[in-house]
Image (tube, rainbow, N blue to C red):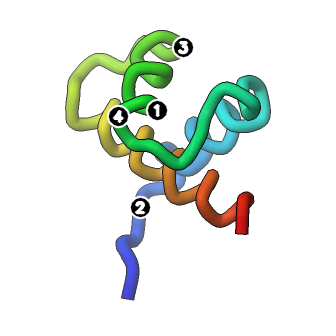
Amino acid sequence: MGNIRPSFIKIRAIRLCNEYGDEFNDDFEHNKKLVEKYTDVPNKKLRNWIAGYVTRYQQRRID
């Protein structure tokens, strides 16, 4: 079973992937820096949550 994430995390992550898709990849640390650069997320937990979903989303797109 996987994690169930709130829709606001998914919406932001998918929007980032659509706008900057070629810059994101399946490396969490790389994506975390890009999420910090492209968003105004107020705290580290939300940034990591979005970056984690971006990472999983990119892994599924590659397969």
Q: Could you say which quadrant of the image residue 33 lies in?
A: top left
Residue 38 falls left or right of residue 63: left
Question: Which is in the foreground here, disc 2 or disc 1?
Answer: 1
Q: Which residue lies furthest to the left in this view?
A: 44
| Disc 2 from disc 4: Cα separation | 19 Å
Q: Is residue 32 left or right of residue 56?
A: left
Secondary structure of the residue carrying tag 3 is helix
Which amino acid type corresponds to the residue marked 4 in the rendered image? Glu
Q: Name the residue under label 4.
A: 29
Q: Circles 4 and 3: CB distance less than 8 Å?
A: no
Q: Is residue 56 left or right of residue 58?
A: left
Q: Residue at x 77, y 25 (%)?
A: 19
Whether residues under marks 2 and 1 lie with C-beta atoms below 8 angstroms apart, the answer is: no
Q: What residue type is labelled 2?
A: Arg
Question: Pointers 4 and 1 in contact (CB under 8 A)?
Answer: yes
Tell me how far mark 4 sits from mark 3, CA to CA. Answer: 15 Å
Which one is closest to the eye, mark 4 or mark 3? 4
Q: Do the residues labelled 1 and 3 touch (CB within 8 Å)?
A: no
| Residue at image mark 1 | 31
The image quadrant where one finds the C terminus is bottom right
* Residue drawn at point x = 61 percent, y = 34 percent: 24
Give the residue type at disc 3: Tyr
- Tell me which residue sits at (35%, 34%) in the image: 29
| Quadrant housing residue 30 | top left
| Residue ID for mark 2 | 5
Q: What element carries label 2?
A: loop
Q: Which of marks 2 and 4 is nearer the N terminus?
A: 2
Looking at the rendered structure, the kind of residue marked 1 is Asn
- Looking at the rendered image, the disc whose residue lies closer to the viewer, 2 or 4, is 4
